[in-house]
Amino acid sequence: MKNVVKKENAVSRQFLGVDFVVLSTGKDTMVAKMLYKATDFVPFHKHPNEQSGYVISGKYKLKFGGEEYLLSEGDTYSILADVEHSIEIIEAGEVVDVFSPIRQDYV
């Protein structure tokens, strides 16, 4: 567990070509900041983690549950575990994601 992580100690990672930093992790949750580039695209995928996010900056097209959502600064979302979803980056930016349980493929 890393209950408090100073920004200079955040761990940089990459998944599906997307850069992100792992922030704090608890017993059952983790926080990550996604650093989306305009050239990134996250294809349909699913994972056993519930995912909730907050858009800091940028513009995105999020798809799940047969719906399509245009997201921008200040918007939030929650995706249940094992639900297929994808995200298209319309404009580069940052998103904070919270996962429960912790994504083992991110640590």
Image (cartoon, rainbow, N blue to C red):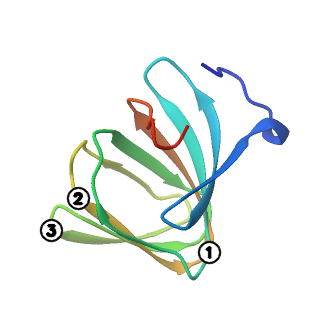
The answer to whether residue 5 is above or below residue 33 is: above
Q: Which residue is mark 2?
A: 84
> Circle 1 sits in a helix, a strand or a loop, which is it?
loop
Give the residue at x 55% y 37%: 107
Tell me the CA gap for discs 1 and 3: 25 Å
Q: Position of residue 6 (x, y in %)?
A: 80, 33
- Residue occupied by mark 3: 66
Residue 24, numbered circle: none
Q: Earlier in the sequence, mark 1 or mark 3?
A: 1
- N-terminal label among 3 and 2: 3
* Amino acid type for the residue under numbered disc 1: Lys
Q: Is residue 95 left or right of residue 61?
A: right
Q: Position of residue 58 (x, y in %)?
A: 59, 71
> Is the residue under label 2 in contact with that under label 3 (CB below 8 Å)?
no
**Which amino acid type is marked by label 2?**
Glu
Q: Residues within 10 Å of mark 3 (few under 14, many from 20)?
A: few
